[in-house]
Amino acid sequence: MNWLRNFMAGRYGGDQLNIALIILYLILAMIAQITQLWVIWILEILLLAFCVFRILSRNVERRYKENLQFLKLWNPIKGWFQNRIIRAKDKTHRYYHCPKCKNTLRVPKGKGKICITCPVCKTEFIKKT
């Protein structure tokens, strides 16, 4: 294993973008198996080659910037899905948006019709919990 450590010294290695590329590669591989389209096979091979290129690259700064750009796009999407999962698991609260400032407010379920006051803009509105 020492030869692998020596070979990878100074190279970029794996990151979140490479993981996303590998997942996309696997999805394309399944689609290519089902559809038998040669265009998808070529796209799949190019995607895997780009992933290997990024892992073995010695231009660490450039790969780091690529990963940061990917994370700027990915983190809001990931956060939106995580937020939906958390809300689905929360059985004791309801979530509303303030009509004025669009802030998300969490109120307890089962209280009937209540007046909700936004803590940010102090707007009051009535909702049924």
Image (spheres, rainbow, N blue to C red):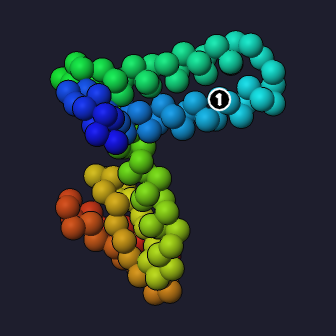
Residue at image location 25% in from the left, 32% down from the top: 6
Quarter that holds the N terminus: top left
Expressed as whole percent of the image width and height from the top left, the position of residue 4 reads: 33, 35
Residue 38 placement, left or right of 78: right
Residue at image location 50% in from the left, 86% down from the top: 110
Residue 125 is drawn in which quadrant? bottom left
Residue at image location 51% in from the left, 34% down from the top: 22
Residue at image location 46% in from the left, 82% down from the top: 92
Residue 46 placement, left or right of 119: right
Residue 124 placement, left or right of 53: left
Residue at the spot of label 1: 28
Residue 68 in view in this figure: no
Residue pushed farthest front?
2
Residue 117 in view in this figure: yes
| Type of the residue with mark 1 | Leu
Say what secondary structure mark 1 lies in: helix
Expressed as whole percent of the image width and height from the top left, the position of residue 98 reads: 34, 59
Please tell me which residue lies in front, 121 or 18: 18
Figure check: 62 above or below 115: above
Figure check: 81 above or below 21: below
Expressed as whole percent of the image width and height from the top left, the position of residue 122 reads: 21, 65
Residue 3 is drawn in which quadrant? top left
Expressed as whole percent of the image width and height from the top left, the position of residue 108 reads: 41, 82
Residue pushed farthest right?
35
Instruction: For label 1, count other residues whose C-alpha is less than 10 Å away and answer few (under 14), some (14-19) or many (20+).
Output: some
Residue 115 placement, left or right of 5: right
